[in-house]
Amino acid sequence: MVTRAERNATDPDLGVLAGRLLFAVQRELFTELAARGFDDLNHRHGAVLAYLDPDGVRATDLARLSGQHKQIIGTLIDELEALGYVRRRPDPRDRRAKLVCPTARGLAQSEAADAIMATIQQRHARRLGRTEYDRFKQLFTDITEHQRRHTGT
């Protein structure tokens, strides 16, 4: 009988593959961010940082976009605010709501992260060829969105 470990070593399922990719990308991204002076961040913060816009975004939208619970996003926002990456301000379209806005440090981190991610993606595009890489991303996006619709996230 084949063990789960053996099966996932030779024929990994979608969850295992997605996890391996996520963890490897996070490891490279946050190691490089630390080398660039953003050593107070950890991979959990990516659920907020990946979706921040210069004009700000509501916490409820961050939860929806990232697929995380609102409570988790709230905790991450608190942490990032204490670290100086974001600040909360009233939403000019609805004074009852708050926007999570990047600070100057948050914008600098976003620029660094975008450059690191571009390098990672370019490396994979060179390895597979641009057409094949673009097709991979298209299919991966389709599967991801289909799964999120299926589970209501």
Image (cartoon, helix red, strand yellow):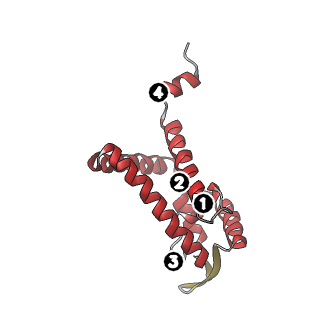
Image depth: mark 2 or mark 4 in front: 4
Q: CA distance from mark 1 to mark 4?
A: 35 Å
Disc 1 to disc 3: CB gap under 8 Å: no
Residue sitting at 51 percent across and 77 percent down? 54
Confirm whether residue 100 shows in the render: no
Q: Secondary structure at mark 3?
A: loop
Label 2 sits on residue? 153
Label 3 sits on residue? 54
Label 4 sits on residue? 11
Q: Earlier in the sequence, mark 1 or mark 4?
A: 4
Image depth: mark 2 or mark 1 in front: 1
Crowdedness near tag 1: few (<14), some (14–19) or many (≥20) residues, C-alpha within 10 Å:
few
Q: Secondary structure at mark 4?
A: loop
Label 1 sits on residue? 35
Disc 4 to disc 3: CB gap under 8 Å: no
Q: CA distance from mark 2 to mark 3?
A: 25 Å
Residue 85 in the image, given as x and y percentages of width and height: 63, 72
Residue sitting at 69 percent across and 61 percent down? 71
Q: Secondary structure at mark 1?
A: helix
Q: CA distance from mark 2 to mark 1?
A: 34 Å
Amino acid identity at mark 4: Asp
Q: CA distance from mark 2 to mark 4?
A: 27 Å
